[in-house]
Image (spheres, rainbow, N blue to C red):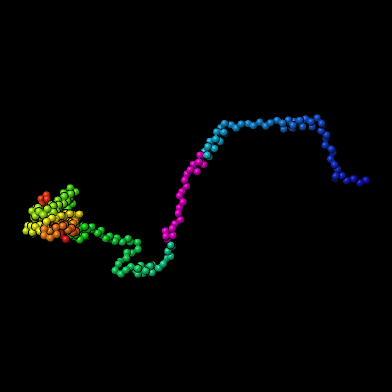
Amino acid sequence: MAEQPEDLFKTEADPPSTSSQELLGLRARLTAKQETPAVRRPLPVPVLAALAVMLAAAVIGVVTWARTPGPPPQAAPAATDVAAPQSPSDPAATATSDKASVPQGLSVAPSGVTSKAKRPAKPRALPLSDVLPALPAVALPVVRNYAAVLADRRGVNAAIERYRDGAARLDAAAVRAVWPSANAQDLAREFGQLQEQQVEFHSCDLDIKETTAAASCTGVAGSAQKIGSTSLRFNDRRWLFTLKRAGDAWLIQDVVIR
């Protein structure tokens, strides 16, 4: 009788059953582990100190780097500072061009040799008298003090007043006292023809120098003749006086009546 083949798909035997008490115990242990809080162990003191030192060093390094100024920005080179590359050329052609650019009569030092040119002598400063032409001597005006000018004006006015007073009184001697160069006979003849005379000066312009003076006086003069009309006839007159200093006083040199 032939043997039957072993069943290849035969199921394994059922696993052994676990008791209910063991399952309850295992569940209780798992629940206890889940409910128990985890215990954290603190780090040792040396480790904490090392971490603090490293953190402080890192902070100091960052602050130092932030405060350190960077290098100044370099400006781009100007176009004139950049030398154009020179292409190699023929030495003979270069020497020919250099000789052509030098004016005739000047020597050119060979390449690589510095020529010591003689500097021109510094021009000598010329004295001012050699540069400017000689100026003619100019006489400076004499500046007189104010008190002397006032004294001269009073002296000139006093001489003119003496002349006016003598002419108004028909006193030839009084007129000649302030006008010594006057002709006594002419004064006597002129005053002898008049019965009365009045002279008034309205204003006088004075030009006083060191020892001479000139005065231009305007006014009126009226006279009455002894023969004929005895009434005064007034006319506008202008007197031109020329005076000269005589010590502290002034005397009349000439009188022109217009």
Percent position of residue 99, x then y: 34, 68
Percent position of residue 144, x then y: 17, 50
Q: Quadrant of residue 40?
A: top right
Magenta segment includes 77: yes
Magenta segment includes 14: no
Q: Quadrant of the N terminus?
A: top right
Q: Would you say residue 151 is visible in this rendering?
A: yes
Percent position of residue 59, x then y: 52, 39
Question: Which residue of the protein is positioned furthest toward the right in this rendering?
Answer: 1
Q: Quadrant of the C terminus?
A: bottom left
Q: Nearer the viewer, residue 57 or 8?
A: 57
Q: Quadrant of residue 238?
A: bottom left
Going 84% across and 40% down the picture, which residue do you hit?
12
Going 32% across and 60% down the picture, which residue do you hit?
114
Going 18% across and 54% down the picture, which residue do you hit?
201
Q: Which residues are magenta?
A: 60-83
Q: Main secondary structure of the magenta part?
A: loop
Q: Nearer the viewer, residue 229 or 104?
A: 229
